[in-house]
Image: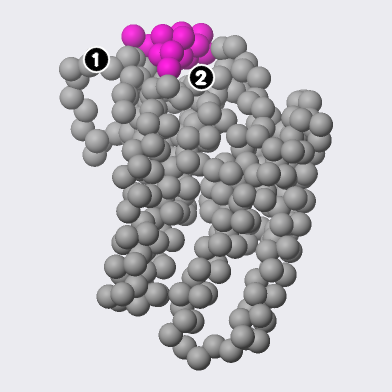
Amino acid sequence: MHPDPGSSSLLSGPRARAKGTFFLCLASLVTLAVVSGTRTQQITFSEYVLMGAALLAALLFDYRMLGRFLRRCDAERNNRSSLHDSATAALRSLLKWPLLARLLETELLTLYYACFARLSHSDPAAEGTQFSYEQTANARDVYLFVALSQLPFVPLIHLLLESKKGPGVAWVVTLLTLWSVVWYLAQVQAVRFRPLQLQDGQLRYRFGLIWAADIPVENIRLAREIDVAEQLDPGKLFLSPLGSRKTVLIEFDAPVVFTGPYLLKKRRRKAAIAVDEPSQFLAQLARRGARTS
């Protein structure tokens, strides 16, 4: 059980500002896209007014839905073991249809982690059962590299494509570029809120919002630290996508299925996993019967 981390006295101000910023950016993008796509056509003032009214109504509806979602996350936090579980439960309860929730889950959780997760308190660390990979993964450095290498050039590329190929192509490229930056920002927060867990005889592997696997400890044949000079074949093992230093190698008795976004799957007999404190991680695996060296 967790105390409600979304108390109005603590988060109402920051959360309201975050919601306002989110919808201001969204409204600006949609408005620019509409104006860009219609400026070469004969659009009357009244038609612009109608489009603006429809856009405003849609944004107000979404703003209210977002408020309901955040409040539901706070309520679910008292009954769930992690921030991610509470956000997923809130999302599924609001969308009603399981298939719709499954299809949109990755995108909506990406927006949640990128824009709102930072306003929540981290789950209290459980000694001996939770292991961080925040420092080893270098997720923040990867995000800064992606953002600084793309954002400054977005306006120039957009104007060039719009003049050469038209607004349709320009906005597709621009939105995909912006989404890649948002996606990496979401991974930074997910790395913080989704540590590795040893729970109920399982290693619950989570890497951001990308890959996940529940691995029975009894299925672990050997776990050991990787020597710096050791050569690994990426085609024969699972590698943490954002980790720049893969410090622990785990071998399995039977292939483990790692599930990724959009139902992607990888079956591997080995995994190289980044962990901030590999010696502590290996010691806890050994206490649960896994062979380590």
- Residue 169 sits above or below residue 112 on the image: below
The magenta region covers 276-293
- Residue 47 sits above or below residue 155 on the image: below
> In front here: 57 or 283?
57
- Residue 137 sits above or below residue 158 on the image: above
> In front here: 103 or 145?
145
> In front here: 178 or 130?
178
Which quadrant would the C terminus be assigned to in this image?
A: top left
State which quadrant residue 136 falls in: top left
Residue 288 among magenta residues: yes
Residue at image x 18%, y 17%? 229
Residue at which label 1 appears? 227
Q: Dot 2 lies on which element?
A: strand
Q: Dot 1 lies on which element?
A: loop
Is residue 206 at least partly visible in the picture? no
Residue at which label 2 appears? 131
Is residue 228 at least partly visible in the picture? yes
> In front here: 280 or 168?
168
